Amino acid sequence: MKITPVERALRIKQLRDKKALEHAEKVRARAGRIAGRRGRKKKTATGKPRRARGSLSREEIIQAAEEIMVTEGVEALSMRRVAEKLVCSVASPYAHFKNQEEIMRELIVRGEQTLIGALQTARASSPDVYLQLAAIAHAYWKFANENRERHRLMFTGAGGRLYRKAFPTLPRSYRVLLETVRHGVDTGEIPYTRESYPAIARTMWAWMYGLIVLDLNGMMRYPQGVDPVEEGIVFLTRMLRGGEHPKFDRRSRQAR
């Protein structure tokens, strides 16, 4: 059967339209696959979706760092470990903190605030200065034992250096002890001269931290049932009540 020129043109048009339609369908399908890949979140090694960089908050980063410190130790703290904990890229925490040191300093500051609260509560527990000092010593001991890794971060090794950076003058926690001793001297409960109270506070602070560090490192040995803090406070109280102290030559700094 002979095809007329009009029919041939119509068939050619239909064929071209079919090919154009098929091509358009392929383009749409390909675009859909690309959009799907872009829309899906990247998976981590654990299979969890990786969080977007802008979805992190400063508080989440601190909380993750604190959990790592408590469960894995101070040595495990790193920007990479924090990123793993939060299931994000290593670069994400840098949106809120310049470096790992800034995170550690924030943990130290928060620890200091917790310690101050405990010490102020201890000081307010009694009007008697000796009972106040005993309560303060026990508060230091309790804080260290309930926050072992935080205490290590605050007062030992590199953490001690960061602590001094965070508090270049006297730490507020130490001021609670210092002011308690000064008040006892001013009221006459501690029978020493006013010039003596800083030395008394320093001595007590050094004793407490020496005791704590030795205990945290497993170097303390004392009979079961013995409270090493109470044991020391008994001797300290006896010495303070006695009111006897050496006179110092300010030039030589030697006791006479």
Image (cartoon, rainbow, N blue to C red):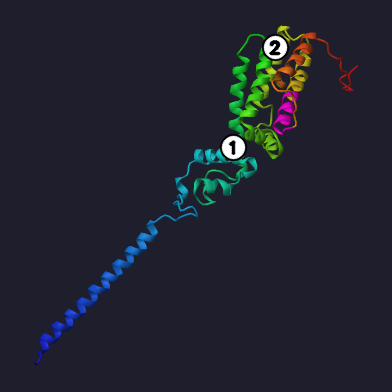
Decide whether the magenta segment is chiefly helix, strand or loop. helix
x%, y% of residue 117? Answer: 58, 22
Quadrant housing the N terminus: bottom left
Q: Is residue 236 magenta?
A: no
Marks 1/2: CA–CA distance: 34 Å
x%, y% of residue 180? Answer: 68, 15
Query: Which residue is situated farthest in the top direction here?
Result: 188
Q: What residue sits 72% from the left and 24% below the top?
A: 208
| Circle 1 residue | 70
Quadrant housing the C terminus: top right
x%, y% of residue 59? Answer: 50, 38
Residue 16 shown left or right of residue 182 in the figure:
left
Amino acid identity at mark 2:
Tyr
| Circle 2 residue | 130
Of residues 98 and 215, the one drawn nearer to the viewer in this rendering: 215
Span highlighted in magenta in the image: 206-218
**Local SS, label 2:** helix
Of residues 120 and 219, the one drawn nearer to the viewer in this rendering: 219
Task: Indicate whether 136 appears above or below 80.
Answer: above
Is the C-beta separation of discs 1 and 2 under 8 Å? Answer: no
Residue 176 seen in this snapshot = no
Task: Indicate whether 163 appears above or below 119.
Answer: below
Query: Nearer the N terminus, badge 1 or badge 2?
Result: 1
Q: What residue sits 53% from the left and 49% below the top?
A: 84
Amino acid identity at mark 1:
Val
Residue 78 seen in this snapshot = yes
- For label 1, the crowd category at 10 Å Cα-Cα, with few meaning under 14, some 14 to 19 and many 20 or more, is some
Instruction: Write down the quadrant of residue 163 in the picture.
Output: top right
Q: Is residue 211 magenta?
A: yes
x%, y% of residue 250? Answer: 86, 20
